[in-house]
Image (cartoon, rainbow, N blue to C red):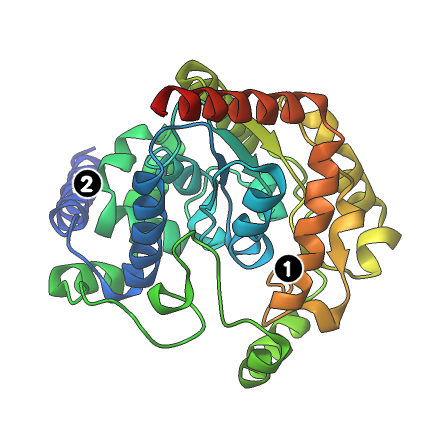
């Protein structure tokens, strides 16, 4: 008995020491979390400049960042639009929690989530862990028990070491991602077909990973809970959520495999939030992609955004919201005269 008590006691002490080491490096900026923080800074600045609400806010990963042109949406619908997309590697909880910094009363949130978001099972990945420890420590307390456990015990030793070194803080200005390649409205720039040539190795590496198998995991209960709770948060705030298909490279497997077909065709029915569009209609050819299967070129972004405009125009609720926002602006303009 003493042996087992000693073994348990030793395990408990080591666990507490590990948790202490993880927690003490929290809030210290890492280089690996820098570019995401830089880009979110732009999104927040864009929101602060148009802080009267009644805006279109795009929320999602890099498919939204590279694939949606918020300026086109703004010009088409006559409503301020901000692209809040950053990186799907941050995972569903972080993206939703972070978006609360820019969403305001009266906004409508368009969420073209990457399909991995719907597979989310409560297990935190390396980038989500890194970003929360380095930049948003308070998010830890908003996670579930399972998520907290993985945050604490899946943090790598190197990540703890990097946290204590705290070498982050300077904006990253090189590479295809980051502060230098995002405009004032949150859209990715410098992604033309000619720009894509220098990142062809990234595309080749992505092609070796395909096809992605979202149907095997299916729509996870944890993902549904996060999305439905987020929709409720927006309702209480006076905002709305609409889910959309993301821009993604097409692959025959997504149509030929039964599990994949069930996954894409069943999204609308498995989540208690409005989902517009058919995922298959927003899958694109290889030559329309920039450097991954979720990143469109500039030219393809125009095509994709126009398709989204048509999709949104077919929704009465969205167009009613647009009419209300335009009416409010007209009344405000008359009062200011």
The x and y percentages for residue 226 are 49, 29
Q: Secondary structure at mark 2?
A: helix
Quadrant of residue 146 within the rendered picture: top left
Residue extending furthest toward the front: 337
Who is closer to the viewer here, 79 or 40?
A: 79
Quadrant of residue 234 within the rendered picture: top left
The N terminus sits in image quarter: top left
The x and y percentages for residue 318 are 64, 26
Please give the name of the residue rendered at 69% of the width and 66% of the height, measured from the top-left corner.
Answer: 210
Please give the name of the residue rendered at 60% of the width and 66% of the height, measured from the top-left corner.
Answer: 298
- Circle 2 packing at 10 Å, graded few (<14), some (14-19), many (20+), is few
Number of numbered markers: 2
> Marks 1 and 2: CB-CB under 8 Å?
no
Can see residue 271? no
Quadrant of residue 31 within the rendered picture: bottom left
The C terminus sits in image quarter: top left
- Circle 1 packing at 10 Å, graded few (<14), some (14-19), many (20+), is many
The x and y percentages for residue 95 are 43, 42
The disc placed on residue 301 is 1
The disc placed on residue 3 is 2
In this rendering, is residue 207 above or below 118?
below
Which mark's residue is nearer the viewer, 1 or 2?
Answer: 1
Please give the name of the residue rendered at 72% of the width and 33% of the height, measured from the top-left corner.
Answer: 313
The x and y percentages for residue 216 are 70, 46
Q: Using residue 197 as the reference point, say whether residue 300 is left or right of it.
A: right
Which circle's residue, 1 or 2, is located before the other in the chain? 2
Who is closer to the viewer here, 276 or 80?
A: 80
């Amino acid at each position: 008995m003493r042996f087992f008590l000693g073994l348990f006691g030793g395990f408990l002490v080591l666990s507490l020491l590990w948790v202490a080491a993880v927690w003490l490096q929290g809030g210290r900026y890492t280089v690996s979390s820098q570019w995401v923080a830089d880009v979110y800074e732009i999104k927040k600045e864009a929101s602060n400049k148009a802080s009267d609400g009644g805006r279109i806010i795009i929320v999602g990963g890099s498919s939204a960042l590279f694939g949606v042109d918020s300026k086109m949406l703004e010009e088409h619908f006559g409503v301020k639009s901000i692209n809040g997309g950053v990186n799907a590697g941050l995972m569903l909880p972080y993206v939703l929690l972070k978006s609360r910094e820019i969403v305001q009363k009266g906004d409508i949130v368009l969420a073209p989530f990457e399909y991995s978001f719907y597979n989310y099972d409560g297990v935190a990945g390396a980038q989500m862990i890194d970003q929360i420890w380095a930049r948003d420590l308070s998010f830890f307390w908003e996670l579930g028990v399972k998520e907290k456990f993985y945050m604490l015990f899946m943090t790598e030793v190197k990540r703890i070491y990097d946290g204590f070194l705290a070498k982050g803080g300077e904006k990253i200005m090189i590479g295809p991602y980051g502060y230098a390649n995002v405009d004032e409205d949150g859209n990715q720039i410098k992604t033309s077909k000619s720009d894509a040539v220098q990142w062809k190795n990234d595309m080749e590496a992505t092609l070796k990973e395909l096809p992605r198998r979202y149907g095997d995991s299916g729509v996870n209960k944890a993902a549904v809970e996060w999305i439905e709770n987020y929709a409720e948060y927006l309702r209480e705030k006076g905002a709305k959520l609409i889910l959309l298909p993301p821009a993604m490279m097409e692959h025959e497997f997504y149509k030929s495999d039964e599990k994949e077909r069930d996954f894409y065709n069943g999204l609308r029915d498995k989540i208690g939030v409005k989902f517009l569009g058919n995922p298959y209609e927003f899958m694109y050819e290889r030559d329309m992609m920039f450097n991954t299967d979720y990143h469109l070129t500039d030219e393809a972004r125009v095509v994709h955004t126009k398709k989204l405009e048509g999709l949104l125009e077919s929704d009465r609720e969205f167009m009613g919201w647009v009419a209300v926002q335009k009416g409010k602006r007209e009344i405000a303009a008359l009062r200011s005269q």
